[in-house]
Image: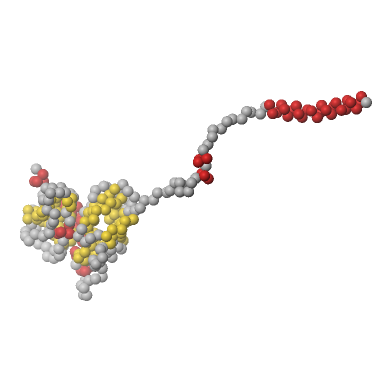
Amino acid sequence: MRGRMATAVSILVLAGAPQVVAQSAKDQQPKSIALPAVSADADPRRAKPGTAERVQFADTLQKITVEPGVNEIIQIAEGHPNRIVTPFEEPRIVTTAAASVETSENVIYVAPANAGLITMFLTETGDESVSISLTLQPKKIPPRELRLDLPPGVLVPKADDAAPGLDRTARPENGRAYVARAGEVFDQLAQGRVPGDFAFSQQASPPYPLCTAENGFEVSFSTGQYLLGQRQEVYVGVVRNGGPATASFQEPWCYSEGVIAVALWPHATLQPGEYAEIYLARAVVDPAEFDPRAPRPSLLQARRQ
């Protein structure tokens, strides 16, 4: 009897031991930490339709209808190449701007080196009947693509529209190298230098080039200068804005048969009463001889004093 009781007591003690141990482990658990409440709107799964952030894209394509003989002012990217798609098969470019200009078929690539305005004229190679006048304004914007179209009814010249039996390439004023040379001459004139292969004269003999200037502009070559090269002659004159408001001179006003290129310096947009030099290059057949060259003085110097 006593033995049975001892066994029972032993069983009870062993059976109770786990309860004591379990209670001791519970007392050792760390206290819970209260976490701040988070709004349900922070859960991306609860976002409302249309509230997700959208990726922004720059619209760099612009289609422009350009009127022949009317200057179009367009913004382009500074320090980046810009793509200009022209309606001409082989565009001829006349510009004196300090920018990288390249052509590929009917496309022109322009990369401005600074924020200075870029003026240029575009025509079909070998055909001066239709011209596009552009003023490109470099800005801190992404590179742009401009697609130029002529208005309905304006016939787009073609590079192969020459009359039967007429070899356009035989005319020096129609060659790209010939036009590029005119731009180089203009650059040197703007720097006050005379190109090494040109003879310089302080006075040009009449007849002078004619310009059908508008908007109060006055053009004079009678008191200007004259340079004669092997295949080109260049007239240097002055342009004055005689109108009441700031305006831009349009180089096509001076285009006629035989004219290769026209440019103004230091800029084509003049305030009332302001002067600029004008450079006009024409093709020559039988150049005459001139005396040795001398440094070219600026025609604007006397008017600034």
In the foreground, 218 or 264: 218
Residue 42 position, x and y percent, is: 50, 40
Q: Quadrant of the C terminus?
A: top left
Quadrant assignment, res 290: bottom left
Give residue 152's position: percent from left, percent from top. 26, 65
**Against 41, is 267 above or below?**
below
Farthest residue to the bottom: give it. 164
Q: Residue at x 29, y 48 (%)?
A: 139
Query: Residue 26's x, y, as percent?
Result: 69, 28
Looking at the image, residue 148 lies above or below residue 140: below
On the picture, is 21 further left or further right than 298?
Answer: right
Q: How is the image coloured?
A: secondary structure
Regarding residue 286, the answer to whether it shows in the image is: yes
Return the residue nearer the eye: 162 or 131: 131
Q: Is 305 positioned to the left or the right of 29 in the image? A: left
Q: Nearer the viewer, residue 273 or 236?
A: 273
Q: Is residue 176 visible?
A: no
Question: Which residue is located at x 78 percent, y 28 percent?
Answer: 17
| 254 over 78 or under it: above or below | below
The residue lying at 20 percent from left, 64 percent from top is: 128
Q: Residue at x 49, y 45 (%)?
A: 47
Between 243 and 93, the one lying in front of the other is: 243
Q: In the current view of this chain or complex, which residue is farthest to the top?
A: 2
Quadrant position of residue 259 = bottom left
